[in-house]
Image: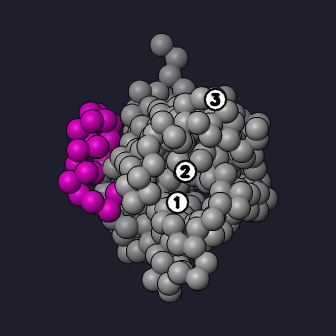
Amino acid sequence: MNRKLEGKVAVITGANSGIGLATGKRFVKEGAHVFITGRREPELNAAVREIGRNVTAVQGDVAKLADLNKLYDLVRRTTGRVDVVFANAGVAEIAPLGEITEEHLERIFDINVKGLVFTVQKALPLMPDGGSIILNASIVASKGWAGWSVYSATKAALRSFARTWTADLKDRRIRVNAIINSPGVIETPGLTELLRPTKQTIETLSDGVPFGRIGAPDEIAKAVVFLASDDSSYVTGAEFFVDGGVARV
């Protein structure tokens, strides 16, 4: 059996549920050892049990550099390298202009931008040439959805990072790509939290998806496997849309 990530070492942030957890399971199935992070220890421990093997969990918050240092210190001591980074951790909160607070702005940018920057930067000394970095971005970076301005700005930053970091890392042949999905069309615990105050349902969201249904986290995970593997060896600086057609139709 030819597994796409045989012998690879991967770091996945925000892997205690949703897309991160689904990707952890896919990576292990394809032969990788994964280090997963999450802020909530009970959910992180449950994720380890669900993945089942070849997984190491490190509780922490990507917005705290000390927690990232703890993660990569363990990677260094355990495997000595990381071949793939999936910078997945992020938070989505709605706040229309006029109701944006300093706390909201700092929280979203700390996790979605600062946390992602240092997740990637701190991995580089452990990453061999030819590695792969995948950023979890969003269609909201180019859409004008009411109430999403701060979150959208963070995701626009990620899409920019995929291009600029490709240039920064070209001499090391480290590929940097962004996976583009849509908040509200992937069925995750985060979606449930967003829907609760608005009283929307999965069925009403599906009406706005050209493909006619919302997506599953594993459908994103399969695309992340492609970008992590040698199957995408000539793909870098790209935006890989997995959103049921929402952004393009």
Residue under label 2? 183
Q: Say whether residue 105 is visible.
A: yes
> Where's residue 39, x and y in %?
32, 62
Dot 1 lies on which element?
A: loop
Q: Which residue appears at 23% of the width and 38% of the height? A: 49
- Residue found farthest to the bottom: 102
Q: Is residue 115 left or right of residue 148?
A: left
Closer to the N terminus: mark 3 or mark 1?
1
Closer to the N terminus: mark 2 or mark 3?
2
Q: Is residue 87 left or right of residue 159?
A: left
State if disc 1 and disc 3 touch (CB < 8 Å): no
Mark 3 is on which residue type? Phe
Give the distance between the C-alpha atoms of the residues marked 1 and 2, in whole angstroms: 27 Å
Q: Is residue 12 above or below residue 111?
A: above
Q: Nearer the viewer, residue 1 or 95?
A: 95
Q: Nearer the viewer, mark 3 or mark 1?
A: 3
Q: Nearer the viewer, mark 1 or mark 2?
A: 2
Residue under label 3? 211
Q: Is residue 163 left or right of residue 8?
A: right
Q: Nearer the viewer, residue 99 or 88?
A: 99
Q: Which residues are magenta?
A: 35-56
Closer to the N terminus: mark 1 or mark 2?
1
Residue 45 within the magenta-colored segment of the rendering: yes
Dot 2 lies on which element?
A: loop
Q: Which residue appears at 37% of the width and 55% of the height? A: 196
Q: Is residue 52 above or below residue 165?
A: above
Q: Which residue appears at 50% of the width and 86% of the height? A: 102
The circle drawn on residue 123 is 1
